[in-house]
Image (cartoon, rainbow, N blue to C red):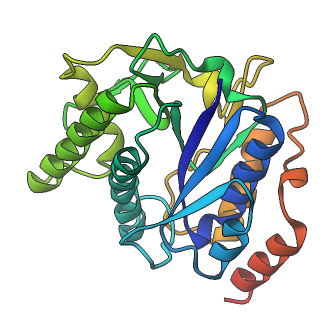
Amino acid sequence: MKYNIFTTANKSYFPFVDVLVNSITENCPNLNRIYIADCGLGEYRKYLHDKDNVCIMDTDVTDEYAGVHSEGWVKATQQKTRVLSKLLHMMDFEDPLIMIDSDVCVLEDLAQVIDKEFDIQVTTMNTGGHTRADGIFISEIASFLIINNSSLGKVFVRNWIKQMEEFAENGTPFPHETPALNMTLQNNKLLEVGYLPELEVCADQELTSRTLSVHFKSNGSTKDNPVVNFESRVMSVDNKTETDLDIDKYLNEEMYDQWRSEYETN
């Protein structure tokens, strides 16, 4: 089954998205195209744009952001759903569209988890969920989401964006993306929803033979140097698996050295 992938990218996250794109290219023979929302790629945009299977999309965010939950990061996450909505309206996809975080490495073809019996498929937390301090219950995450029905997907994403806007207006604490996703799912009366296990589609622990993609999840720090951020997150996941992830084979060494030296001298 053919499908498309959508993600966002920023200069600070360049090695992550390089790993993502190259791992998809190698392990996903059923891929049509990867759509990347440029949230401040800077000079690294051309490198990604020159890849045959990549289409770069403009956003309203052009400045580099320092880390997770920083002001720039918040703006970028808000752009993700808006660009996703634009993409759905612009392309009117017949094939499924997978929205995936940029800090993910794909190990096997993602076609095997697509089930068109459902309008959308969302990822369920392996912990079963938790209640935030503001009372919002979180059981699904926005790291990996499949839209199988483009028409109903447009409605769902529009409602998701509306919920994020309501959170912003009433002062709900950041981040908004995942809580708004959960509220939209809880209020859904229109779509057939399928649920995917986190440990299968974006695992960051307990990696098994069924794990299709690995998520280099952040610890939430806004202070780490981007080099420290990348290398520590990759190492954290690598230490939890018995198999060698061999991330290096998905990194363009020349581009990574250029990026690394830029941040090490700042």
Q: Nearer the viewer, residue 158 or 129?
A: 158
Q: Position of residue 221 (x, y in %)?
A: 51, 59
In this view, 23 is above or below 187: below
In the image, is 257 to the left or to the right of 228? right
- When the figure is inspected, residue 95 is found, relative to residue 81, above or below; the finding is above
Q: Nearer the viewer, residue 249 or 57?
A: 57
Q: In this image, 154 relative to 33: left or right?
A: left
- Residue at the image position 38 percent from the left and 44 percent from the top: 88
- Residue 245 can be seen, yes or no: yes
Along the horizontal axis of the image, is 177 left or right of 55?
Answer: left
Does 244 sit above or below residue 78?
above
Quadrant of the rendering where the C terminus is positioned = bottom right
Q: Quick one: which residue is furthest to the left in this view?
A: 170
State whether residue 133 appears in this view.
no
Provide residue 220's location: percent of width, then percent of height.
Answer: 49, 53
Counting from the top left corner in percent of width and height, residue 62 is at: 44, 77
Give whichever of 254, 216 is nearer the camera.
Answer: 254
Along the viewing direction, whichever of 257 and 204 lies nearer the viewer: 257
Which residue is located at x 33 percent, y 56 percent?
Answer: 78
Indicate the position of residue 138 as horizontal and vertical percent values: 34, 28
The reply, left or right, for residue 137 in relation to residue 48 is left
Image quarter for residue 11? Answer: bottom right
Residue 246: image quadrant is top right
Residue name at image x 72 percent, y 32 percent? 30
